[in-house]
Image: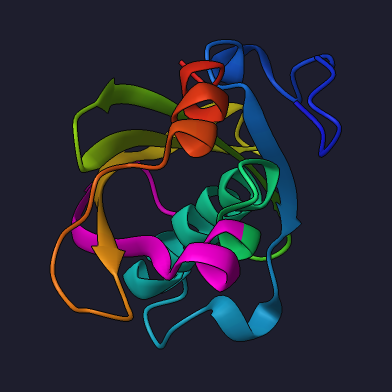
């Protein structure tokens, strides 16, 4: 999906179930002393595509208006293959679960050069009332958009 929520072709067949997608060039500086992309970079790629989904759901605008916003409660990654420079990563995300005050997103990273899934993971997002502190219900307007990301 794009920011106007119109469907588009998948960047890679391995991402066909992931409605939010980005292509991200691998930088030489992403590499570590062992000659492959450092594992922390995979989490940043997850974050990049997750925030693209947040932008579509207008979470920043909702937070500015209501004080209700997302916080990362947990995240995980299964590393399937190393990535090296030069390459482009196709990053995808989809919503797999929506609760009263939380939702779960599934991430997938595909290497253009290798043509395979190089990592998969998930993120649990909890809604926080940043003005009062503590958990809060997921705003209805955000829930509707997240439902479309399943």
Q: Residue at x 50, y 37 (%)?
A: 142
**Is residue 84 in view from this perspective?**
no
Q: In the figure, residue 143 lies in which quadrant?
A: top left
Residue 91, by quadrant, is top right
Name the residue rendered at 56%, 16% in the picture. 148
Residue 141 highlighted magenta (yes or no) = no
Q: Quadrant of the C terminus?
A: top left
Image x and y of residue 6, in percent: 85, 19
> Looking at the picture, does residue 72 appear above or below residue 132?
above
| Residue at (66, 66) in percent of width and height | 85
Q: Residue 123: where, in percent of width, then height?
A: 27, 47
Residue 73 vertical placement versus 12 (above, below): below
Does 111 sit above or below residue 50? above
Quadrant in the picture for the N terminus: top right
Q: As rendered, which of 72 and 46 lies closer to the eye?
A: 72
At which x and y percent is residue 65?
58, 66
Q: Magenta span has 79?
A: yes
* Res 70 → quadrant: bottom left
Which residue is at a point 60% across and 64% down the rendered structure image?
60
**Highlighted magenta segment, given as a residue range:** 62-84
């Amino acid at each position: 999906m794009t920011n106007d929520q119109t469907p588009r072709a998948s960047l890679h067949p391995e991402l066909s179930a992931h409605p939010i997608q980005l292509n991200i060039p691998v930088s030489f500086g992403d590499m570590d002393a062992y000659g492959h992309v450092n594992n922390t970079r995979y989490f940043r790629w997850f974050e990049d595509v997750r925030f693209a989904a947040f932008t579509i759901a207008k979470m920043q605008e909702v937070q500015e208006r209501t004080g209700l916003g997302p916080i990362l409660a947990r995240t995980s990654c299964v590393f399937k293959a190393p990535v090296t420079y030069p390459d482009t990563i196709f990053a995808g995300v989809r919503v797999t679960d929506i609760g009263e005050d939380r939702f779960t997103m599934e991430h997938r990273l595909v290497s253009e050069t290798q043509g395979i899934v190089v990592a998969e993971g998930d993120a649990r997002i909890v809604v926080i009332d940043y003005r009062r502190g503590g958990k809060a219900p997921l705003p209805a307007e955000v829930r509707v958009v997240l439902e479309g990301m399943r």
